[in-house]
Image (cartoon, rainbow, N blue to C red):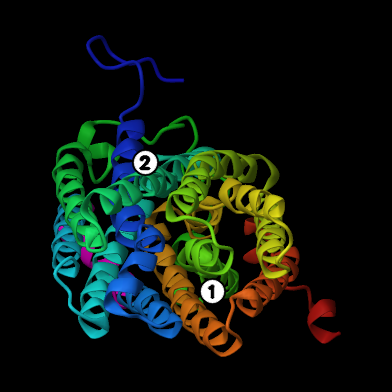
């Protein structure tokens, strides 16, 4: 390990970038997306939203996210990720402030779609910084610490929103949106101060500098081949799609299920939501590190298995004690798949193209996010409960497990199949 010169901090600046990235995720995904789960019950009552409309509001956010992810990596590469992330966070903050003034379904849908666009424009370049600042053997751990920002935001919203509602009344959700908007603006300026685009800008090599970021998978063919011609990127994209389809069903509707179908008071549902946030703090670091040691395939299989169990426990409407187990299974792996995927992109395509590849698989992931909440909301509207929606989520998680079992290792993914195998 390189010894730091006198006067420099006893840790690599890459970990400051991780801290700044985590704050960005707190704002763009934690406040900009996952706080919606706590806000929907009171918003639904005040604005008279149906289950279907609630689902479409979540879908609008994901649609905005989808529209931005394909271009975010390329545009941020031209402007520099630091400045691009700053302006995108300001867009998230402004749109959330306007949501607080919304008067009906269509205004919320439009404004929350803009929030999603800003969220995607922040998240893709932030996760792309992992491959620039960290070597292959540390990428999963670094990405894991970044994604836990969503967990901190869930804990904050689980405590803040019920408190504001008690103080302000039925319109308290408007005040909550304004508070979250202000916090997001503060984080935007913190990110501008802390982020650096490349380790070379600080006169540094990547964390784990004894290992080149692409050491594990050398060769000009791996580095130069367009990501759009690499089948493994699309294969990973399909797996990521299944995560995108299933996880927002839980995140969007679990509080509504607790309040509307199970009869829990909003404060108690907020405690459940806070536990998800607390447990999720371990999800990225633990499973990101496990994927560094055991491989991306093993990490993904473990995560999808726990998620499938979580969805089934809600779908089967078992006694209340099983809800604790469901929340435990969901929370402990909540943000682990994005961290594993961000690390996998560096493994499969190299550090230079990791952000672009992550943008492509995130686009495919976004298609799942658009579909999942909308279909779940319509199923619930027709059935009168969310049980069928959670059964569907469990089935899709099962498909993801099967596909992941056939995922080839990075070195093998680039090797041509032998003639005998092609002929058979």
Mark 2 to mark 1: distance in Å?
30 Å
Q: Quadrant of residue 422?
A: bottom right
Is 127 drawn above or below residue 116 in the view shown?
above
Magenta stretch contains residue 168? no
Residue 131 visible in the shown view: no
Report the side of 21 relative to 82 (left or right).
right
Magenta stretch contains residue 79? yes
Highlighted range, magenta: 67-81
Label 2: few (<14), some (14–19) or many (≥20) C-alpha neighbours in 10 Å: many
Label 1: few (<14), some (14–19) or many (≥20) C-alpha neighbours in 10 Å: many
State the quadrant of the C terminus: bottom right
Report the side of 79 relative to 255 (left or right).
left
Kindly state the secondary structure of the residue where label 1 is placed.
helix
Q: Quadrant of residue 100?
A: bottom left
Reading the chain from its start, which is encountered first: label 2 or label 1? Answer: 2
Residue 113 visible in the shown view: yes
Query: Which circle marks residue 62 in the picture?
Result: none
Residue 1, x across and y down, in percent: 46, 20
Residue 71, x across and y down, in percent: 28, 73
Main SS of the magenta part reads helix
Kindly state the secondary structure of the residue where label 2 is placed.
helix
Say which of marks 2 and 1 sits in front. Answer: 1
Q: Mark 1 = which residue?
A: 245
Report the side of 253 relative to 304 (left or right).
left
Q: Mark 2 = which residue?
A: 133
Question: Which residue is at a point 52% across and 49% down the rendered structure image?
Answer: 272
Front residue of this view, candidates 339 and 11: 339
Front residue of this view, candidates 308 and 268: 268
């Amino acid at each position: 390990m390189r010894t730091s010169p006198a006067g420099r901090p006893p840790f690599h600046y890459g970990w400051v970038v991780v801290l700044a990235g985590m704050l960005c995720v707190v704002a763009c995904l934690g406040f900009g997306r996952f706080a919606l789960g706590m806000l929907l019950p009171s918003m639904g009552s005040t604005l008279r939203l149906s289950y279907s409309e609630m689902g479409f509001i979540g879908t609008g956010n994901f649609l905005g996210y989808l529209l931005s992810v394909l271009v975010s990596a390329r545009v941020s590469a031209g402007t520099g990720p630091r400045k691009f992330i700053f302006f995108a966070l300001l867009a998230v903050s402004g749109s959330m402030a306007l949501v607080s003034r919304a008067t009906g379904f269509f205004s919320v849908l439009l404004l929350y779609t803009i929030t999603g666009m800003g969220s995607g424009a922040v998240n893709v370049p932030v996760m792309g910084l992992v491959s620039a600042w960290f070597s292959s053997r540390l990428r999963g751990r670094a990405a894991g610490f970044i994604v836990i920002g969503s967990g901190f935001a869930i804990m904050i919203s689980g405590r803040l929103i019920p408190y504001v509602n008690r103080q302000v009344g039925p319109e308290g959700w408007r005040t909550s949106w304004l508070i979250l908007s202000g916090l997001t603006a503060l984080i935007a300026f913190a990110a501008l101060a802390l982020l650096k685009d490349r380790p070379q800008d600080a006169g540094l090599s990547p964390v784990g500098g004894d290992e080149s970021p692409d050491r594990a998978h050398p060769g000009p063919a791996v580095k130069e081949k367009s990501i759009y011609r690499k089948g493994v990127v699309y294969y990973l994209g399909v797996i990521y799609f299944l995560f995108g389809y299933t996880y927002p069903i839980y995140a969007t509707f679990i509080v509504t299920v607790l309040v509307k179908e199970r009869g829990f008071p909003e404060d108690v549902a907020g405690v459940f939501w806070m536990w998800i946030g607390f447990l999720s703090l371990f999800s990225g670091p633990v499973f990101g590190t496990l994927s560094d040691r055991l491989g991306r395939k093993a990490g993904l299989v473990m995560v999808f298995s726990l998620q499938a169990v979580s969805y089934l426990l809600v779908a089967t409407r078992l006694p209340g004690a099983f809800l604790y187990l469901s929340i435990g299974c969901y929370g402990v792996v909540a943000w682990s798949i994005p961290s594993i995927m961000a690390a996998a992109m560096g493994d499969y395509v190299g550090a230079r193209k990791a952000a672009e590849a992550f943008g492509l698989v995130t686009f495919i992931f976004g298609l799942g996010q658009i579909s999942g909440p909308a279909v779940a909301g319509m199923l619930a509207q027709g059935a009168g409960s969310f049980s069928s929606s959670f059964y569907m989520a469990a089935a899709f998680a099962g498909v993801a497990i099967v596909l992941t079992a056939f995922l080839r290792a990075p070195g093998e993914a680039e090797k041509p199949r032998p003639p005998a195998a092609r002929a058979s």
